[in-house]
Image: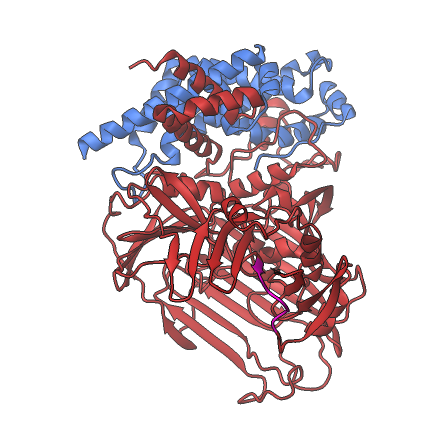
Chain colours: A blue, B red
């Protein structure tokens, strides 16, 4: 399960804003695992996720003085993480690395040809989705966030999130079915 | 091919319903569309499968700890160790526990900062299920305190150690730390080692002379060692008691549990959940599957502290219930408990989702009375037959093999969650056991379902050639979906059988009540129980209706509740068992302890309520609600 994070004590956030490294470190410790998971599911690559997470927290530290409690701290932090993820993923160099990595991933053991796709393939399919559909489905279906929270982080209405999740699911099913057909053709 | 516009709407509604966002009337409209649209029904199945696959994402690697790297970039510090103040005891992560490999499961922990003080019962059930699918390894130690085992040994204490590797490797060691009085008291020392092929158990001999003076053991302090080799996957006769690790059987039904709030154990945040022993038996019994322990009454209260991050039970406690007939039960089983007294207290002293265990942990010794399980694994690829499920609920192929005599076993697994399909080539007609529920899968296909119990998981059978039996610790709904995806039809069992003296009809419970107007139905049943099967027997001298009421997920106390009503009957059949007289309204009834049955005659109608756990309070409550 994800790191269960308490609402940070406002004095901690205040101290971190003022530059107290110990306070900031506690915030990092609390939020970093969940942030990494988000990046991992968006990018499909553990190393890329680590890069993005580190970059994101550097930005959090830089922008912390500008946080004035207008939204929940977690929401604010995750909107930064997400922005970082999007920025990184647009860089073609990274995308190529992901494509290479995906191609070289070994087949899971013990699978029969007409078996249901494994969890790894579902995850790979998610990374193939266009970003505006990928984000909502990762946040809602994989990380278990609520529509309200996701709407707050992405800055779009809940209705938009719902329709994107619906379209993402349809697209995933199509991709996975096509993969199946392909495989049974090869078999 | 573009789907019809009504299908487009339906599919959007399906997605919404999956998220719990569809109101009742839209849901009804959706169901109407689904009734006539196989494509959309297939879509619903696919969506559910997709959601499961997305939610349950075991991570092959750890979530890295990037804190140091981040801090190094943000606040350049000298390399000397920095003094870290204990700033914020409340702000913790799962890294506090000595976790080697964190298994990630799609979580419902929001990045909204406020963690809810409690979870809902439905959330607990859902998350425990998900945790089971993501679990690969486990290691823990517990302290166990037990009260009331024997008048001369009022308190006992034990140390328990558990090692587990999904799906079937377990080692359980229980050491007895009790200081017994003088005499040959059996030390309750237990070692259980199980792996895919072998199951091995060493426990005290079941003949402790201090407790049963008339039994004569061969030697003093004797222990029994038993071994089974060639065991089939997930063999119910050689159980691997995993509910103490992730309690999926105990927390299989939201209606049976009550979330009390939050708590702290081992400096970790937990959810406190209460339930009756009747529903908690799988958890409590997992530490007590061998050896000698004191008994518990079905209505005794169990409280469980579940770790919020991993859902492991870090502590559980059994306290004596206060139901009126508990006194007579105590006399019958030989204990003496004050109401509300603590009977069992189990506390974890350390735990971890382990990455690996020392070699030899799961290797079973080659001693003991050996029984051969008869399973021969086959190494080829999985048979792809239409008699196997197309939908395995996200589980992956695990092992397959033969049990001889025309029986083939095919098993699937994901973490601790398992599914086993047995194909049985057999000529004889198969009849379901009493209380088995008939489930219609399709226009020409029926399945026969029974909930999980002490020796077996949930089971659904498709009669036919071959007979297909699917057994699993998946929840009932998922198991039914799996069985529905099998390409073969389940033949309907004949519903009328004529013998020389009577005609026996198997009916749907509501239809049976209509056919036998003298029979009454209970307005109250324990949580989760519902009517699953009915048998109407017509003979020249009398007609008799028996209805079984069962809990859909788990029953550790027998085959459910059974209500039998017959007419005309003049008086109660005699019994040689111990019984007491009990009042039901203006009538006098007889309660037989051993059978756990309450019987009376009402006018010329005989009525009997059997509650297998021997719980008179429940039987009386049901009796009072008959109408």
Residue B381, position as x, y percentages in the image: 24, 47
Q: Quadrant of the C terminus of chain A?
A: top left
Numbered circles on residues, count: 0
User: Outermost residue, left direction?
Assistant: A186
Vertical order, B470 against A68 (above or below): below
Q: Which residues are the magenta region?
A: B564-573
**B571 magenta-colored:** yes
Residue at the image position 36 percent from the left and 31 percent from the top: A121
Q: Position of residue B600 (x, y in %)?
A: 66, 63
Comparing A130 with A11, the one in front is: A130
Q: Position of residue B576 (x, y in %)?
A: 62, 78
- Location of residue B181 with respect to B339 vertically, above or below: below
Q: Is residue A115 left or right of residue B109?
A: left
Q: Residue furthest front?
A: B540
Residue B568 within the segment the image draws in magenta: yes
Q: Position of residue A68 (x, y in %)?
A: 73, 13
Of B327 and B52, nearer the camera is B327
Q: Main secondary structure of the magenta part?
A: loop
Quadrant of residue B287 in the image? Answer: bottom right
| Residue B226 found in image quarter | bottom left
Q: Is residue B545 above or below residue B45?
A: below
Task: Report if residue A88 is visible in the image.
Answer: no
Q: Residue at x 47, y 36 (%)?
A: B56
Viewer-proximal residue among B10 and B420: B10
Image quarter hosting the N terminus of chain A: top right
């Amino acid at each position: 399960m994800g790191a269960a994070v308490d609402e940070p004590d406002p004095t901690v956030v205040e101290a971190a804003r003022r530059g107290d490294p110990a306070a900031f470190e506690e915030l990092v410790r609390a939020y970093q695992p969940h942030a990494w998971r988000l990046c991992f599911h968006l990018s499909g690559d553990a190393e890329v996720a680590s890069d993005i997470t580190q970059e994101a927290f550097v930005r959090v530290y830089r922008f912390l003085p500008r946080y004035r409690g207008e939204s929940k701290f977690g929401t604010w932090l995750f909107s930064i993480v997400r922005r970082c993820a999007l920025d990184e993923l647009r860089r073609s160099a990274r995308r190529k690395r992901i494509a290479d990595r995906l191609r070289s991933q070994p087949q899971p053991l013990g699978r029969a040809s007409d078996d249901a796709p494994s969890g790894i393939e579902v995850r790979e399919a998610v990374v193939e989705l266009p970003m505006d559909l990928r984000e909502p489905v990762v946040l809602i279906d994989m990380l278990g966030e609520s529509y309200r929270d996701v709407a707050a982080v992405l800055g779009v209405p809940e209705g938009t999130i719902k329709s994107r999740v619906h379209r993402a699911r349809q697209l995933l099913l199509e991709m996975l079915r096509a993969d199946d057909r392909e495989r049974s053709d090869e078999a | 091919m573009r789907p019809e516009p009504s299908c487009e709407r339906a599919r959007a509604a399906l997605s919404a319903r999956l998220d719990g966002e569809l109101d009742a009337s839209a849901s009804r409209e959706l169901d109407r569309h689904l009734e006539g649209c196989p494509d959309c029904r297939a879509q619903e199945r696919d969506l559910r499968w997709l959601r499961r696959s997305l939610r349950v994402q075991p991570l092959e690697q750890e979530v890295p700890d990037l804190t140091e790297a981040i801090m190094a970039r943000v606040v350049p510090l000298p390399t000397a160790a920095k003094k870290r103040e204990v700033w914020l005891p409340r702000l913790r992560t799962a890294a506090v526990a000595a976790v080697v490999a964190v298994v990630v499961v799609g979580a419902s922990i929001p990045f909204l900062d406020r963690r809810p003080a409690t979870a809902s019962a439905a959330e607990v059930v859902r998350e425990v299920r998900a945790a089971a699918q993501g679990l690969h390894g486990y290691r823990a130690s517990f302290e166990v305190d037990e009260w009331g085992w024997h008048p001369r040994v009022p308190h006992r204490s034990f140390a328990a150690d558990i090692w587990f590797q999904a799906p079937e490797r377990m080692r359980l060691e229980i050491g007895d730390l009790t200081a017994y009085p003088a005499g040959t008291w059996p030390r309750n020392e237990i070692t259980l080692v199980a792996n895919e092929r072998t199951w091995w158990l060493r426990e005290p001999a079941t003949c402790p002379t201090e407790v049963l003076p008339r039994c004569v053991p061969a030697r003093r302090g004797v222990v029994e060692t038993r071994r089974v080799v060639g065991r089939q996957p997930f063999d119910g006769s050689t159980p691997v008691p995993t509910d103490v690790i992730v309690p999926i059987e105990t927390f299989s039904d939201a209606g049976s549990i009550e979330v009390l709030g939050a708590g702290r154990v081992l400096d970790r945040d937990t959810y406190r959940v209460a339930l009756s022993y009747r529903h908690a038996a799988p958890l409590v019994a997992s530490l007590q599957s061998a050896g000698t322990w004191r008994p518990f009454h079905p209505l005794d209260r169990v409280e469980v502290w579940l770790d919020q991050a991993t859902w492991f039970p870090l502590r559980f406690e059994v306290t004596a219930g206060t139901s009126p007939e508990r006194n007579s039960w105590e006399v019958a089983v030989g204990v003496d408990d004050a109401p509300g007294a603590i009977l069992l207290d189990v506390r974890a002293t350390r735990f971890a989702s382990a990455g690996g265990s020392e070699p030899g942990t799961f290797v079973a010794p080659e001693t003991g009375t050996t029984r051969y399980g008869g399973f021969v694994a086959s190494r080829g690829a999985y048979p792809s037959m239409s008699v196997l499920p197309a939908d395995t609920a996200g589980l992956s192929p695990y092992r397959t093999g033969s049990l001889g005599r025309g029986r083939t076993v095919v098993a699937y697994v994901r973490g601790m969650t398992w599914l086993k399909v047995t194909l049985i080539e057999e000529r004889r007609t198969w009849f379901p056991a009493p209380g088995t529920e008939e489930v219609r899968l399709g226009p020409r296909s029926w399945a026969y379902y029974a909930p999980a119990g002490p020796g077996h998981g949930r089971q659904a059978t498709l009669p036919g050639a071959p007979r297909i039996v699917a057994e699993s610790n998946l929840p009932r709904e998922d198991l039914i979906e799996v069985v529905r995806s099998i390409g073969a039809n389940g033949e309907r069992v004949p519903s009328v059988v004529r013998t020389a003296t009577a005609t026996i009809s198997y009916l749907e419970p509501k239809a049976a009540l209509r056919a036998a107007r003298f029979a009454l139905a209970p307005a109250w049943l324990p949580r989760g129980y519902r009517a699953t099967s009915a048998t109407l027997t017509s003979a020249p001298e009398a007609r008799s209706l028996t209805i079984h009421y069962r809990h859909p997920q788990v029953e550790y106390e027998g085959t459910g509740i059974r209500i039998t009503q017959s007419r005309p009957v003049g008086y109660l059949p005699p019994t040689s068992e111990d019984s007491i007289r009990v009042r039901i309204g203006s009538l006098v009834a007889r309660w037989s302890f051993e059978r756990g049955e309450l019987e009376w005659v009402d006018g010329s109608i005989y009525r009997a309520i059997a509650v297998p756990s021997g719980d008179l309070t429940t039987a009386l409550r049901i009796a009072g609600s008959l109408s």
